[in-house]
Amino acid sequence: MILKGSAPFKSSGILSVILLTVQFTISVTALILGITFSENAEYQRTLDLGYDRDRTLMVPLTPELFENYKNDVLSDPKVLAADGTGNQIGWGNYRRPVKENQKQVEVDVLDIGPEYARTMGLRLKAGRLFEKERESADRTNNSIIINQKMAGDFGWTDPVGKRITLYDTISLNVIGMVDDFFNSGLWEKIEPTMLRLARPDQYNYLAVRTNKNDVPAVLESLSRKWKNLSTNLIFEGRTQEDLLQEEKDINESILKVNMFLAVVATILSLIGMFNMISLDIIRRTKEVGIRKIQGASIPMIMYLISRKFIVVLIIASVAGCATGYYMSLMFMDSIWDYFVNIGAGILISAVMILVVATVLTLSVRIVRAAMKNPAESLRYE
């Protein structure tokens, strides 16, 4: 039976093979998790959030400090624009119900300065943005800017000129629509949002725009200029990217854990496979010698010895891909509403890493046994 190779799992035991399969399945799963979170980190780093996050900064302040600090900041030639706001994208907003006829929608609200939308780089889709020259008229008319999600929720194809009601008494006039933007990072889905003009005494932040390469220098400049103010408040300015740091830290922490598990699981699996195949070769030493005498080639001997491990690898790859896919999807969906798609490339990459490592492990041990002198093999006890 052994010479015919009809009992591929007998020599190492069914239980050992099952345990090895489980180990390899865990390895594939961990590799998929690690690769997925690595891809997700890059996806979220480069995702267009609907505004220029890599060119903007913000400084929390009080309304009393706003005017003097803004003028000082604008004196820096590297600062392209700056304006005040009551609510900062990625930092906070509030929700209010608004109505059109009998249809009511809960919307996120940001109270902003007249140049804030331009400073942050919001993309205009229809109508116009607030302008300093029209600030007085926009206040009188209760003008607002909405995002595409809000227009869609109301069923508007041409939102400019539409009127809605706040608190059942305040009539608001839509003057423009901007592209959807991530107001709360990637934690939550994009909500219907409207932008209103804030009064100067409501400004809690100064938003600053610069060129991408000048962000570090401008942040340093903001800190120096803050010291010129007559205030005991600590400078808390930061880049817009820093507001997303928590998301990045979580992604990086999960990535490190999964990559560690992937490496450990893979090493343990390969050690287990190496030990099993070493025992198998010892038990089949005479068989290998007889096959060589009968003219079996080294590739044929390699196939006969390694075929059960190939079966293990195939089963583990299929099970690991399914488990890794659903675990990655479950983990990311529990943390973010927007994350990378888990494509076939991620699954194939994880499997190929394990296949290459397995083939190298098998080859080292099997080739050595297959090239052994048949006479020595037949004398083996």
Image: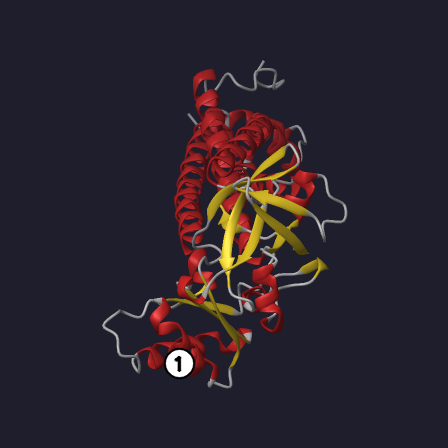
Q: Is residue 237 left or right of residue 339?
A: left
To which residue does mark 1 refer?
A: 221
Extreme left residue here?
232
Extreme right residue here?
157
Residue type, label 1: Ser
Residue 71 sits in quarter? bottom left
Label 1: state its secondary structure.
Answer: helix
Q: Is residue 61 left or right of residue 146?
A: left
Q: Quadrant of the C terminus?
A: top left
The residue that appears at 50% across and 42% down in the rendered structure is 96
Q: Check disc 1: other Cα within 10 Å, few if <14, some if 14-19, many if 20+.
A: some
Q: Nearer the viewer, residue 195 or 360?
A: 195
Q: Is residue 363 left or right of residue 238?
A: right
User: Is any atom of residue 286 visible in this view?
Assistant: yes
Q: Is residue 304 above or below residue 45?
A: above
Q: Quadrant of the N terminus?
A: top right
Q: Is residue 47 above or below residue 208?
A: above
User: Is any atom of residue 289 visible in this view?
Assistant: no
Residue 192 in the image, given as x and y percentages of width and height: 59, 44
Residue 269 sits in quarter? top left
Residue 268 sits in quarter? top left
The residue that appears at 76% across and 45% down in the rendered structure is 157
Residue 87 in the image, given as x and y percentages of width and height: 45, 57
Question: How many labels, in total?
Answer: 1
The residue that appears at 70% across and 48% down in the rendered structure is 162
Residue 54 in the image, given as x and y percentages of width and height: 53, 66
Q: Is residue 235 above or below residue 321?
A: below
The residue that appears at 51% across and 82% down in the rendered structure is 78
